[in-house]
Amino acid sequence: MKKTNCLLFFMGLLLLTLSSCNDKPVAPTELPQEIQSFVQQNFPGQAISFAQKDWEWFSAQYDITLADGTQVSFDTSNVWDKVESHVTPVPTALVPAPIATYVSTNFPAVAIVKIEKENYGYDVELANDLELKFNQQGALMEMDD
């Protein structure tokens, strides 16, 4: 029994190690066209300074960093799932309308600097370090400072 548990532990450790080796830098020109178009549309004039392809079993995800330090993560369908920038606000086109309305009404002078898609909805961080959680419909669920 002990040998089996040890063997399973080391096999799991080996798989974890091998899976972490699948992150590879890629040239911005090698990114899927959807990602390149997303950057051109939502971050005009910003160059991609770093791009990384993360292999997850049989699919790839991408993480990019723009010249101004903005970081964007994409899911396996090449759709953004996280945008984080502490230099410029997250583009309003990426923020669902109910969330944008809530933030502009309740925090009119505070920018959204991070938005992340979650299973429950969206996790939003404001420039004043306030974290807001919204459900899929854009209703506020939780606020944390």
Image: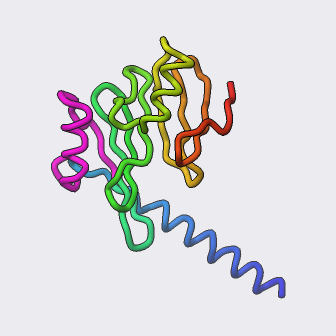
Q: Is residue 40 left or right of residue 114?
A: left
Q: Quadrant of residue 10?
A: bottom right
- In the rendered image, residue 48 lying in the magenta stretch gets the answer yes
Instruction: Please state which of residues 138 and 79 is positioned toward the viewer in this rendering.
Output: 138
Q: Residue furthest right?
A: 1
Where is 30 relative to 3, above or below?
above
Instruction: Please state which of residues 25 and 84 is positioned toward the viewer in this rendering.
Output: 84
Rendered residue at 68%/24% (across/down)? 145
Q: Quadrant of residue 39?
A: top left
Percent of width and height locating residue 129? 59, 22
Percent of width and height locating residue 105? 52, 19
Percent of width and height locating residue 82? 44, 43
Q: Is residue 5 left or right of residue 137?
A: right
Q: Quadrant of the N terminus?
A: bottom right
- In the rendered image, residue 89 lying in the magenta stretch gets the answer no
Percent of width and height locating residue 111? 46, 20
Where is 59 relative to 144, above or below?
below
Q: Is residue 16 left or right of residue 95?
A: right
Rendered residue at 53%/48% (across/down)? 136
Where is 13 relative to 97, above or below?
below
Which portion, as a residue range, is magenta? Answer: 28-52
Rendered residue at 37%/48% (across/down)? 80
